[in-house]
Every structure is written in C-alpha cells, then in structure tokens.
C-alpha cells in the first residue's frame, strides 16, 4: 500500500527543485550574457542549488528505508541505514543549502548597502546563519557518545535529546527568515519608486513570506513531536516541507536578479521616464535591447542593477548624484 507521506517527500524532492534550477540558470544567463559580470552572490546560489539537489536525492533514498512510514512498520534491519542517512547526507546538504542561499541573499543586499549600520546588520545575520547551519550540518558529531550511536541505536552510550536541538535550529531559521524579509525595507523606505516597482517588490517579499510561513510550520511540527516516538513518520512531514522551503528560498533569492533579464527581452515593461529626480547614472535613451536599468559605461563605471528600480546605485554616479531633501539618493 502506497504511503502518502513518503510519496509526498518524493514529489517535493522531484518537483520543487525544477523552478529553482530554471531560475538559477536564468540568473547566470543574465549575469554572463547581459550584465557581463558574475558576483559572489551568484556563485553562492549556484552552490545552494547543487546542495539542494543533493538534499532531494538523500530524501528519496531515505524513503526506501522508512522515511514517512510509521515506526512500527519499519523493519529493524533498515533503521541503521535510515539513521546513517539522517546523520550525514541529509543534514549536510539541507543545512549547507540553507547557509549558501541566505548568504547569497545577504551578499546581494550588501551590494546595495547605504550605511555602515546596514552592512553591520547584514554581517550579524550572516554570523548567526553560519553558526546554526554549521551546528545543524554536524549534529551527528556531538549528539551522541560514541558518535556511531547516532545511527546504531543498539550501541551502548548516551545521546542528548534530538528535539531540543532541532527546535533551537529551526527557531534560529525562523528568526533569520524574518530578518531577511525585513532588511530590504531599510533600503526601500527612503526611496520614491513607481507603482510597478512596488508591485514587483511585493511579489518577491510575498514569496519570502511563504518561506517564513513554512519555517514556522516546521517549528510547530517539531514542538508537537517532543514526546512522540514515531520519528520516521514525523521526519517525513518535516523533510517534505523542508525540501519545498529550500527550493522556494532559492527562487526568492533569484527573483530580484532577473529584472535585467525581463528588461532585456521585454523592454516595454520597464519604461524609464526622464524625471528631474532620476539618478544621473540612468541612461534615459536606451539602445535597442540594452538591459533596462543599466547605465552605459560612458555614463558611470560604477553602474549596477538594482532589485528596486532602474539605475539605482548605492555609490552613485561618478558624474554627480541626485539626492532627496533627506539626503538619500532618489529614484
């Protein structure tokens, strides 16, 4: 009889990476062919995508050894293999995929840093992300003594409770998801931007809100299962949503970077108006099929693509900057 939870894990592992892979490919096409520059955050999201695929493979294999099944229905002969996968491939690929995804988003934000305080906030969040993801990826090294007791349950030794560990890790994941969702407002609030740009930003943040909602739901699953010994079944539900969360997060990380791609192939979507408050780095008369939002090299050597508006550049143009009365750069 088919197990719906195990089938759900397999579906999540095979379907959710597809849009993420497509968007990562489009991001690199944009960076290489349109912008002619590949940033550090692009390489980080590529690493996250590779690890996410590894996470999907690990979970598909783990379903063969009882993931998603109720524990009484799992043969004792498969428990060791199940726990061995849960000790190494699963946490390493899942937590490192999360680490590289969030690092990519943070380094992307750093490109548009407007103040030292904002940059400090980014590095603080990055420090938290690196810390809890490394702890999560290496749980098997410190959860049990001897280490092998983590996957050989009959071995003599001691283990600390798994639920408090994973509760703390997922809680930190929720915390950093919330911070990542709020950080863009630090940049956006002082700016006056067009309605279509606000709608695009709302769409990106809405997708990020879904990731946060999944993180909260996973935290609830762990909290409900504190005293539930049926861990193979609970893990199935948790990992199914974890796979979805990981790949949707990669999609969210790529969306702002595709503005130049859309502007290149559908330039009518982004019309740059010659307004007095526009930055001096914006090229108003764009050549045919030139990526919208990119200042020509003759105008500024520091031009960059922004997720929030055409031609917005945190350093400004070398030939002058238009500033709002509050001292912030205006769009």
Image (cartoon, rainbow, N blue to C red):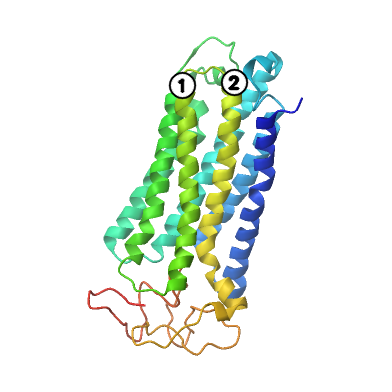
- Place of residue 269 in the rendered image (x, y in percent of width and height, measured from the top left): 55, 77
Give the secondary structure at mark 1: loop
Residue bearing the label numbered 2 = 151
Vertically, is 156 above or below 139?
A: above
Q: Residue at x 63, y 18 (%)?
A: 71
Labelled pair 2, 1 in contact (Cβ < 8 Å): no
**Residue 281 seen:** yes
User: For this rendering, which residue is in front, 94 or 220?
Assistant: 220
Residue name at image x 32 percent, y 61 percent? 186
Looking at the rendered image, the quarter that the C terminus falls into is bottom left
Identify the mark at residue 104; answer none if there is no mark: none
Q: Which label lies toward us, 2 or 1? A: 1
Describe residue 187's horizontal placement relative to residue 15 as left or right: left
Residue 93 can be seen, yes or no: no
Of callouts 2 and 1, the N-terminal one: 2
Q: Residue furthest left?
A: 326
Residue beneath the point at 40% across and 52% down:
180
Q: Residue at x 54, y 73 (%)?
A: 260
Image side of residue 287 versus residue 197, left or right: right
- Vertical side of 62 occupied by 256: above or below: below
**From the viewer's perspective, is residue 28 above or below residue 33?**
above
Instruction: Examine the rendered structure and indicate whether residue 45 appears above or below residue 300.
Output: above
Residue found farthest to the right? 1
Number of other residues with Cα within 10 Å of mark 2, as a class: few under 14, some 14 to 19, many 20 or more: many
- Give x and y (percent) for residue 108: 45, 61
Towards the viewer: 43 or 312? 312
Q: Where residue 288 sits: x, y (%)?
A: 60, 87
Disc 1 crowd rating (10 Å Cα; few below 14, some 14-19, many 20+) is some
Which residue corresponds to mark 1? 226
Inter-mark Cα distance, 2 to 1:
19 Å
């Amino acid at each position: 009889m088919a197990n719906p939870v195990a089938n759900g894990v397999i579906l999540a592992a095979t379907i959710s990476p597809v849009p993420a892979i497509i968007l990562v490919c489009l991001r690199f096409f944009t960076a290489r062919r349109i912008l002619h520059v590949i940033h550090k955050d692009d390489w980080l999201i590529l690493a996250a995508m590779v690890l996410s695929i590894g996470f999907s493979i690990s979970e598909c294999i783990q379903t063969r050894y009882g993931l998603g099944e109720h524990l009484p229905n799992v043969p004792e002969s498969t428990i060791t293999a199940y726990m061995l996968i849960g000790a190494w491939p699963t946490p390493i690929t899942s937590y490192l995929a999360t680490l590289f995804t969030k690092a990519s988003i943070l380094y992307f934000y750093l490109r548009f840093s407007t103040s030292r305080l904002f940059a400090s906030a980014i590095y603080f969040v990055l420090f938290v992300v690196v810390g809890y993801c490394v702890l999560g990826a290496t749980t098997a090294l410190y959860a049990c003594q001897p280490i092998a007791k983590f996957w050989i349950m009959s071995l003599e030794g001691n283990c600390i409770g798994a639920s408090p560990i994973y509760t703390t890790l997922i809680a930190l994941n929720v915390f950093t998801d919330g911070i990542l969702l709020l950080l863009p407002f630090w940049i956006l609030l002082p700016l006056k931007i067009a309605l279509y740009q606000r709608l695009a930003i709302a769409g990106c943040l809405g997708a990020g809100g879904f990731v946060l909602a999944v993180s909260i739901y996973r935290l609830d699953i762990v909290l409900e299962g504190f005293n539930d010994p049926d861990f193979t079944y609970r893990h199935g539900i948790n990992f199914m949503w974890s796979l979805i969360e990981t790949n949707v997060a990669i999609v969210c990380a790529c969306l702002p970077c595709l503005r130049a791609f859309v502007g290149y192939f559908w330039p009518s979507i982004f019309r740059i108006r010659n307004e007095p408050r526009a930055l001096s780095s914006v090229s108003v008369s764009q050549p045919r099929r030139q990526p919208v939002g990119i200042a020509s090299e003759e105008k500024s050597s520091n031009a960059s693509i922004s997720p929030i508006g055409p031609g917005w550049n945190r350093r400004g143009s070398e030939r002058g900057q238009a500033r709002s009365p509050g001292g912030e750069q205006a769009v």
